[in-house]
Image (spheres, rainbow, N blue to C red):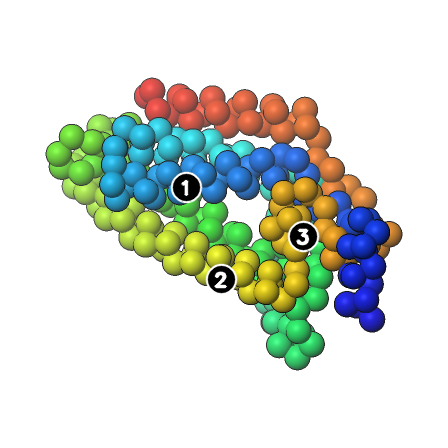
Amino acid sequence: MADRETENTRETGAGAYVWDLPTRLFHWSFLAAVATSLFTAEFGPMDIHLISGHVVLALLVFRIAWGFAGGRHARFASFIKGPAKVMGYARKTMSDGVSAHLGHNPMGGWSVVAMLAALVTQVASGLYANDDILTEGPLAGTVSKSTSDLLTEVHEISGNVVYALIALHLAAVFYYTFKGQGIIGTMITGRSLDIDAAGAEGGAEGSLSRAIMIAAVAAGIAYAVMNY
């Protein structure tokens, strides 16, 4: 029955509105900035690595704020669930298979938190890191050399954690896509064709003016840090 409803929803073009425009813009901008940071960390140039790192900083500040001020499904309160709900969702998925879920499911919600935490650690430590040659973070001069060296190690370790989380995220995306969930399309259009609009609650639309104000503040913070 659920598969038939999903098929009908796709045929009619109806769908539940899930991701507001600021969330979608953040997601794809974040993907580009993190990919650039990881690539330039391995192959250079380091000038681009520093710039992309500050872009990631601005995007992190925005996403954390948007987690409290964004649309319904962008808010942390909508997808950070307790252990009981996470385990219940995992058991249901194993027994009944994948089912459509508005926004992040309970397991996916915690993967988002883990990714944000790892990248906050990565960016914060990078501000104080150095490579003992030519490049150092903009705040490296505010701490001792030993502290900077320690934070450089943290930066490298958290980078490996980010790689692992990206691999996990991609595996989940491929898995849900293989199971027929249009999660990539939903992050592009904002609408889930797996769930009928009639079954969705309102409030998914985030305020564009609020997003612009938050983005401006986030960009200002990153710019101030970069030029400290």
Relative image position of residue 126 (x, y in whole percent): 30, 38
Task: Please name the residue shown 45% across and 38% down the image.
Answer: 32
Residue 26 is left or right of residue 228, and the answer is right
Say the numbered circle drawn on residue 103: 3
Q: For the residue marked with disc 2, what is the amino acid?
A: Ala
Task: Please name the residue shown 25% across and 41% down the image.
Answer: 43
Q: Which residue is denoted by mark 1 in the rendering?
A: 34
Q: Residues within 10 Å of mark 1 (few under 14, many from 20)?
A: some
Which badge, 1 or 3, is on the more N-terminal residue? Answer: 1
In the picture shown, does residue 178 fall above or below 47?
Answer: below
| Spatial CA span between label 1 and label 3 | 22 Å
In the picture shown, does residue 55 fall above or below 95?
Answer: above
Relative image position of residue 174 (x, y in whole percent): 53, 61
Q: Which residue is denoted by mark 2 in the rendering?
A: 171
Q: Nearer the viewer, residue 212 or 21?
A: 21
Which badge, 2 or 3, is on the more N-terminal residue? Answer: 3
